[in-house]
Image (cartoon, rainbow, N blue to C red):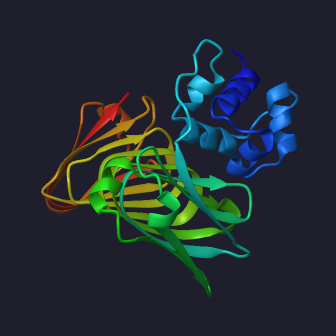
Amino acid sequence: MKLSEKIKSLRKGAGLSQEEFGARLNVSRQAITKWESGEGLPDIGNLLVLSRMFKISVDDLLSEEKALAEKLFLYESRVTYDIEDLRDYDIHLGCAAEITVSGNEGEKLEVVCSSNDIADVSGLIKIKVDDEGRSADVDLKLRDGITETLCREALHIDIFLPQRYVHKVEIAARTGKFSLRHLEYDNFEFGGKAEEIHLSEIKGETELDVNSDVVIKADSFAGKLSLNQVAAVSTMHIPSGKTVATRTHGIRTRILCDRSELINPDAEDIIELNGIKSELTLVFD
């Protein structure tokens, strides 16, 4: 099945008109028509949105052999905010099953909360954006009637940042899976808890403050990647053939790797482990 046919099948399976589908993707009905007729293709940002909405990988979307079995989340809440200049972003999200942060080509900050189990996601979960000066603050607030436990099990959050207006980003959250994709910045900091972190096509200084064991999948990154931990044992997967420099700071921290030929102290891309009594194993896949 071709991509155009898959998009049409997904839309119809969700019971959406082209106009309704476009509204969910923040594109025009005409764009949907072009995608479904094969006259145009979604850009990478829209492919990522489709991937998350239908819980299907981008590879599966682009593969003609894969069948479509997944559907849209049943419930969704969307907040969009216009950004007009370079910003620092301070984002507090609390608990969620999965959080994804992506760059987009437009000028909008967008936060999408989705779930298959939280029917009143728009009423129980509120996103507040406070944009003053050089900083845009984003806060997630829970209303009476919903617990952090349920959010940890059933809430999915997608955040889209306008790439042209990103300077620094700080995110505080507790989640099972955190993904950072297609974004360039001066500094990005994630603080909280995550069992799995996925990094793809990012560039800048990245800090991960995770004081628990974590599996990091760094498909592609450029710059300095720092992991700050206390009494933790973690693993980082890196593409085979990539050369990195490694550094450790603190008390009884160490980085282990069985591919010494891929460790070069002069490499531009750096992996750093900071903290106390922590261990990081590098795996080149």
Farthest residue, direction top: 65
* Left or right side of 184 for 172: left
Q: Position of residue 17 (x, y in %)?
A: 76, 39
Q: Position of residue 127 (x, y in %)?
A: 51, 70
Q: Nearer the viewer, residue 58 or 143?
A: 143
* Left or right side of 168 for 170: left
Q: Position of residue 77 (x, y in %)?
A: 56, 58
* Left or right side of 153 for 225: right
Image vertical order of residue 235 relative to residue 9, above or below: below
The mark tally for this picture is 0
Q: Residue at x 37, y 48 (%)?
A: 154
Q: Quadrant of the N terminus?
A: top right
Q: Position of residue 112 (x, y in %)?
A: 56, 56
Q: Nearer the viewer, residue 64 or 223?
A: 64
Residue 180 visible at all: yes
Which of the 4 quarters of the picture holds residue 173?
A: bottom left
Q: Nearer the viewer, residue 44 or 208?
A: 44
Q: Nearer the viewer, residue 8 or 34?
A: 8
Residue 202 visible at all: no
Q: Residue at x 65, y 38 (%)?
A: 47
Which of the 4 quarters of the picture holds residue 189?
A: bottom left
* Left or right side of 150 for 126: right
Q: Quadrant of the C terminus?
A: top left
Image vertical order of residue 139 relative to residue 131, above or below: above
Q: Residue at x 30, y 31 (%)?
A: 259
Farthest residue, direction bottom: 133
